[in-house]
Image (spheres, helix red, strand yellow):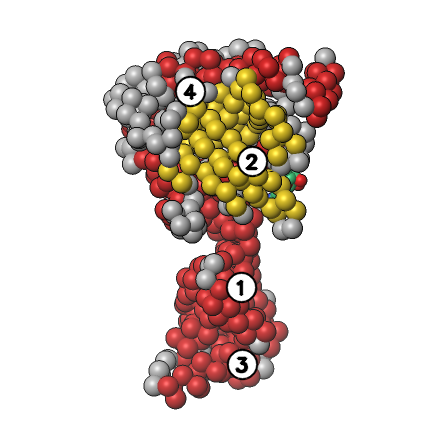
């Protein structure tokens, strides 16, 4: 025991430990930076970059680290790069770890909910803003356990640097044991040192995980650090609270009544209905012409024509799979087209005048200037942000509104949908109905001219449907907002829609005033659908 304690405190081994820590730090930090770069290349749409990154990761993951160490140490000097053993060991470790980090980061980025990515795009976030504000924070959080594992692996792998004479802990252990023949005590002391270090790394990982997990009761949260929270503003307190189970929780959307939400100062956030862009095609805000869309070889839209006029509420009805959601998603170019065109206020969206698809960055700007907001079936709230941040964030990142003003605006909108008291909650702490009301508030924040609602109540429990329909009903009847609603709620559609378009197999088989389509549909398919849905709704 005394030998063990003697070696455990031996300066010779502690110096080795210090070098092990240095190697680990170089390997981890360098590996992380390289991993981010490689992951970006792997995810790039520019195929040559992705191919280079794939070859690199295959080479580095497919060959032993010990060979890579020798390679860096002995081959680089021939290219005029002479590194000390410590630096060569650190660089070799970093190069090796980079390919593992790249795969961790790549898969974490891919795992971020595609619905949230679609919501970010629909809100007008550019690809860079989407990555920075929505994808990276969530991917980073999801990567923490795997990154922690890699930190431990880097430390253990650093022992292999002894092969190029880096005097780290393992090499010194071997040297000391060979000189004293006291193998057991020395190796035991070294094992304890490694265990303490790797245990400390695991502890740090767990702390970071706790810190970065938002909304866990009793846990400090990276995303809700006190110093990140907005200061309370005079008059910015939510003005109404609402019972979760209330049937009709919506105060009057006064801002929307006045032509859509405006900023806290009363100034337009991006554009206003009082100052519309010049229209070239009469009163139509949306003009969809001969839309064709296929997934693979399966046609989903087969020549859809749809005009929506300013202030009109159009209900898209049709059997499941008829293409309602797809049609809505083509209207703001969340889905590209195989044929046809969409004009918003006379301007094509997604394509230039020659029909070439524009860059995502340009399309993001088009989405903002065209003023098309969207509400999703699955809500698609940003799960790493609070309710208020979900509404205020896009205002800041897309419309350039200051934080205080954006928060005030968010609070106004949350009051409007009856969720003042949940502004600091995380989306997963809300019921489905509440989440959808936040989704509506978020879509209204940018002062849209047109609101697309993609089956806004389909994912809700029956008892939550009424609260969301109440919000939409108020918007439809009081705000003057142009709306296109895909829905299976016939009674609701009949109540709010000015016009109904009935889709079947990717074609609008009948469209006209709501009363006519509901009371006297001309097409047998429409009649059959209305009959079957009426039975289902009884
Ligand atoms: N990303 C996709 N990849 C492949 N097929 C898809 C995709 N999205 C939709 N589809 C298919 O396109 C067809 C139309 O889907 P869509 O969601 O537009 O219909 P819908 O009328 O909205 O249906 P529902 O009322 O059930 O939501 C369906 O057959 C669906 O399986």
Return the disc, 2 or 3, that comes first in the chain's sequence. Answer: 3
Determine whether the beta carbon of the residue marked 2 sits less than 8 angstroms from the nearest atom of ligand 1: no
Which residue matches tag 1?
100
Disc 1 crowd, CA 10 A, few/some/many (<14, 14-19, 20+): many
Q: Is residue 174 above or below residue 442?
A: below
Return the disc, 3 or 1, that comes first in the chain's sequence. Answer: 3
Marks 2,3: beta carbons within 8 A: no
Return the disc, 1 or 4, that comes first in the chain's sequence. Answer: 1
Q: Using the image as rendered, state which of residue 178 and residue 301 is in the foreground.
A: 301
Q: Position of residue 498 (x, y in %)?
A: 51, 17
The secondary element bearing badge 2 is classed as: strand
Which residue matches tag 2?
304
The residues bearing labels 4 and 3 have C-alpha atoms spaced at a distance of 69 Å
Q: Using the image as rendered, state which of residue 451 and residue 341 is in the foreground.
A: 341
The secondary element bearing badge 4 is classed as: loop
Q: Using the image as rendered, state which of residue 256 and residue 401 is in the foreground.
A: 256
Quarter residue 184 falls in: bottom right
The residues bearing labels 1 and 4 have C-alpha atoms spaced at a distance of 53 Å
**Ligand 1 shown in quarter:** top right
For the question of whether residue 69 can be seen, the reply is yes
Between tags 1 and 2, which lies in front? 2
Which residue matches tag 4?
311
Q: Is residue 518 above or below residue 13?
A: above
Q: Using the image as rendered, state which of residue 110 and residue 273 is in the foreground.
A: 273
Write the residue at 55% across / 30% down. 454
The secondary element bearing badge 3 is classed as: helix
Q: Which disc is residue 393 wearing?
A: none
The residues bearing labels 2 and 3 have C-alpha atoms spaced at a distance of 61 Å
Residue 33 is left or right of residue 264, and the answer is right
């Amino acid at each position: 025991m005394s030998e063990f304690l003697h070696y455990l405190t031996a300066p010779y081994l502690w110096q080795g430990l210090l070098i092990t820590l240095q190697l680990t730090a170089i390997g981890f930090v360098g590996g992380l930076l390289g991993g981010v770069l490689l992951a970006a290349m792997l995810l790039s749409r520019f195929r040559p970059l992705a191919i280079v990154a794939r070859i690199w990761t295959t080479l580095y993951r497919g060959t032993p680290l010990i060979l890579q160490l020798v390679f860096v140490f002995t081959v680089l000097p021939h290219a005029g790069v002479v590194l000390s053993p410590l630096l060569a060991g650190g660089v070799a470790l970093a190069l090796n770890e980079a390919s593992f980090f790249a795969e961790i980061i790549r898969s974490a980025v891919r795992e971020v909910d595609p619905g949230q990515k679609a919501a970010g795009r629909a809100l007008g976030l550019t690809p860079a803003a989407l990555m920075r504000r929505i994808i990276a924070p969530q991917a980073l959080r999801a990567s923490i356990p795997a990154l922690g594992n890699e930190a431990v692996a880097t430390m253990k792998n650093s022992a292999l640097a002894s092969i190029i004479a880096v005097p780290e802990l393992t090499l010194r252990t071997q040297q000391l044991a060979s000189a004293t023949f006291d193998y057991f005590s020395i190796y035991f002391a070294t094992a304890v040192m490694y265990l303490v270090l790797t245990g400390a790394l695991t502890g740090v990982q767990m702390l970071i995980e706790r810190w970065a997990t938002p909304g866990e009761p009793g846990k400090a949260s990276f995303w809700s650090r006190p110093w990140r929270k907005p200061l309370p503003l005079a008059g910015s307190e939510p003005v109404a609270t609402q019972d979760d189970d209330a049937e009709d929780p919506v105060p009057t959307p006064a801002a929307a009544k006045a032509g859509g939400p405006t900023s806290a100062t009363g100034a337009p956030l991006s554009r206003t209905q009082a100052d519309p862009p010049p229209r070239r095609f009469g009163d139509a805000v949306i003009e969809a012409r001969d839309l064709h869309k296929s997934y693979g070889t399966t046609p989903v839209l087969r020549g859809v024509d749809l005009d929506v006029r300013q202030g009109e509420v159009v209900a898209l009805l049709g059997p499941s799979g008829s293409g309602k959601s797809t049609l809505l998603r083509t209207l703001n170019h969340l889905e590209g087209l195989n044929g046809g065109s969409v004009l918003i206020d006379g301007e094509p969206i997604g394509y230039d005048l020659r029909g070439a698809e524009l860059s995502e960055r340009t399309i993001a700007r088009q989405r903002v200037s065209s003023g098309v907001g969207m509400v999703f079936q699955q809500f698609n709230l940003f799960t790493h942000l609070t309710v208020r941040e979900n509404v205020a964030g896009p205002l800041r990142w897309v419309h350039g509104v200051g934080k205080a003003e954006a928060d005030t605006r968010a609070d106004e909108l949350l009051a409007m949908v009856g969720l003042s008291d949940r502004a600091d909650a995380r989306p997963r702490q809300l019921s489905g109905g509440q989440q959808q009301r936040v989704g509506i508030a978020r879509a209204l924040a940018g002062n849209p001219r047109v609101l697309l609602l993609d089956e806004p109540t389909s994912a809700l429990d029956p008892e939550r449907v009424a609260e969301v329909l109440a919000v939409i009903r108020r918007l439809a009847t009081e705000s003057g907002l142009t709306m296109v609603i895909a829905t299976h709620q016939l009674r609701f559609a009949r109540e709010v829609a000015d016009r109904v378009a009935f889709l079947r197999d990717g074609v609008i088989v009948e469209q006209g005033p709501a009363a006519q389509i509901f009371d006297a549909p001309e097409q047998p398919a429409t009649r059959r659908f209305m009959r079957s849905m009426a039975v289902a709704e009884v």
